[in-house]
Image (tube, rainbow, N blue to C red):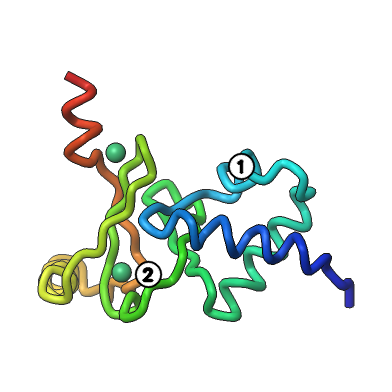
Amino acid sequence: MARYNTHQKTAIISFFTEHQTKSYSAEEVSSYLPAIPRSTLYRLLSQLSAEGIIRQETGVDRTSLYRHLGSGCPEHMHIRCCRCGRTEHLDAETTRLIEKLVASSSGFEALDSTIFEGLCSDCMKERK
Ligand SMILES: [Zn+2]
Ligand SMILES: [Zn+2]
């Protein structure tokens, strides 16, 4: 088993701790932490997700997005601004409602790890 530099792992953890309200793709994390080689970064991201420190979610275009895991987050879905990366928690009621609608229209069980994408209110204002 390859051993990873603890410093690299700490750098990734502090990056997510400092940006708790946002989610990032591996490419975005890489642009903030250019000192960490891509292959190492990918492995550390999946290791940290497995350890429950960050959470891996799947965006609508199937990109993996990573985010600091807040308490209670596995119980609800999230929505991410595709322009600035801001991520909001959808409340449990909204999550259940979406699950119901998905189940009745498709028979599928939607996963709580689903992350929606859209434009936040600030970005909508700026676009005008
Ligand atoms: Zn949450
Ligand atoms: Zn935004």
Q: Position of residue 98 (x, y in %)?
A: 15, 67
Figure quadrant of residue 43: bottom right
Identified at 43% across, 71% down, the residue is 69
Q: Which mark is residue 113?
A: 2
Counting from the top left corner in percent of width and height, residue 45 is at 63, 63
Quarter that holds the N terminus: bottom right
Marker disc for residue 32: 1
Q: Amino acid at mark 2?
A: Ser
- Residue 115 position (above or below residue 75): above
Where disc 1 sits, the SS reads: helix
Classify residue 47 as left or right of residue 123.
right
Nearer the camera: disc 1 or disc 2: 1
Q: Residue at x 46, y 65 (%)?
A: 68
C-alpha separation, residue under disc 1 versus residue under disc 2: 24 Å
Q: Nearer the viewer, residue 3 or 18?
A: 18
Residue furthest top as drawn: 128
For label 1, the crowd category at 10 Å Cα-Cα, with few meaning under 14, some 14 to 19 and many 20 or more, is few
Element type where label 2 sits in the image: loop
Q: Amino acid at mark 1?
A: Tyr
Vertical comparison of 3 with 88: above or below: below
Seen at 36% across and 38% down, the residue is: 84
Residue 121's spot in the image, x, y percent?
17, 38
Decide if ligand 2 comes within 8 Å of the CB at mark 1.
no
- Split into 4 quadrants, where in the image is the C terminus? top left
Q: Is residue 22 left or right of residue 42?
A: left
Q: Position of residue 82 (x, y in %)?
A: 35, 40
**Which numbered disc flags the more N-terminal residue, 1 or 2?**
1
Q: Is residue 12 left or right of residue 57?
A: right
Q: Is residue 16 above or below residue 111?
A: above
